[in-house]
Amino acid sequence: MKVLVALTYYRPHVSGLTIYVERLAKALAARGHIVTVLTAHYDHALPREENIDGVHVIRVPVAFRVSKGVIMPTYGQWATRLVREHDVLSVHLPQFDAWGLALRARLFNKPCLLTYHCDLQLPDGLFNRVVDQVTFSANYLAATWADKIVAYTQDYADHSRLLSKFKSKIEVIPPPVIMPAPAPSDVAAFRARHHLYGRPTLAFAARLAAEKGVEVLLDAMPTLLERFPTLKVLFAGPYQNIVGEEDYWARLAPRIQALGDHWEFLGTLNPLTEMPAFFGGIDCLLVPSLNSTESFGLVQVEAMLCGTPVVASNLPGVRQPVKMTGMGEVVPIGDSAGLAEAVTRILRDKPRYVRPRGDIAASFDLERTVDHYEDLFEAEVARTTHRVVLPRQRPTEPLVERAVEPAVTGGPRE
């Protein structure tokens, strides 16, 4: 098949969405499909076109930005040509241009599948509220014209402002996770390099953005430092000059700097060669997200695969990895005191939360995710072209959101 994948930002931009799409695109290409990624030329240092791991990446020039969005005057020309040339569209939202892609798919009788990664919620301000509404309207049109909509979990689909309006189109596909088991020698070297021996260690693995809830931890730090005087926090991911997050960084920077040796920024780490040791070298990963712009948190599963428990906020979707595995605690949204208590319980009895790697890997697997996408693509292509496609024989059963008794503190705040 010829698969056109469309999203606003692609790698090397770092976010859960870009990592998800990169893994999917590369895996489809490795299976012999012709994969093209249509994205924004957000950084002029990047080439306009290139081939990365078998994926043809086309970056459309950006005229100007609107908050975190981009305006690309020639996008329509590229979209028209590429939709005609491909068998199926895989469009990843939130994305302002998705409606135009879905419309072209309808006009050219090409199946269009949306993957809805999260709701869009920009920082406070009248202008940003207008941008939010415009983007929601564009995404609503895209969902109306799309054939299927992929969600990470049924939990998020049921609570999302957009997805809840299109329940008949929803297909739940687990997100793709790749995380090698950390080598003990690498973990030991990581802990020595960052002076972690004898120090309880918490961590974020994210870009520094308002929805990540970094201030929830900052508010909890006095309590945690009183209980664990040598506590250290590591932040892996980009933290400066993040598009749309400059004010957030300026607000938090003085508080973080005041923590001195208790906080260390690591920058962006290589996902396969550095992140395993990072996850294996910490005691607890934090995902205290604040709103529905976070729908799951791939890093939770990555940490669990390395033997590290998670404290996550009680948001639809975000709470699912802990609920499905029992490997951590769920705390009320924005509750610093609750976060401090959950972290304390994990640091004082970490073995109680750890599950075998095989149990985690059985539920979250890249190949299973790609199997689901491949089946869905083929079924939709067959429907639009009136061809008969025999179902593939898969060795594993589809993932269900089974409940494992987790440690949960506080009810949902929705």
Image (cartoon, grey):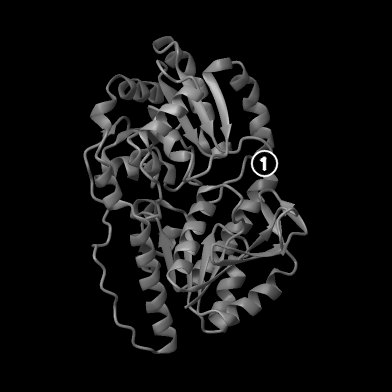
Residue 251 point in image, percent of width and height: 65, 27
Q: Residue at x 26, y 56 (%)?
A: 400
Q: Nearer the viewer, residue 235 or 195?
A: 195
Which residue is found at the position 54% from the left and 62% from the top?
A: 53
Residue 155 coordinates in the image, percent (x, y): 35, 51
The residue lying furthest to the front in this view is: 185
Q: Is residue 147 above or below residue 281?
A: below
Q: Position of residue 257 (x, y in %)?
A: 62, 19
Report whether residue 335 is seen. no
Label 1 SS: loop
Name the residue located 34 percent from the left edge and 44 percent from the top edge.
Answer: 321
Quadrant in which residue 51 is drawn: bottom right
Which residue in the rendered view is the most extreme toward the right? 63
Q: Nearer the viewer, residue 338 or 180?
A: 180
Give the number of marks: 1
Q: Quadrant of the C terminus?
A: top left
**Left or right of 401, for residue 82:** right
Give the image location of residue 239, x and y in percent: 61, 35
The residue carrying mark 1 is 125
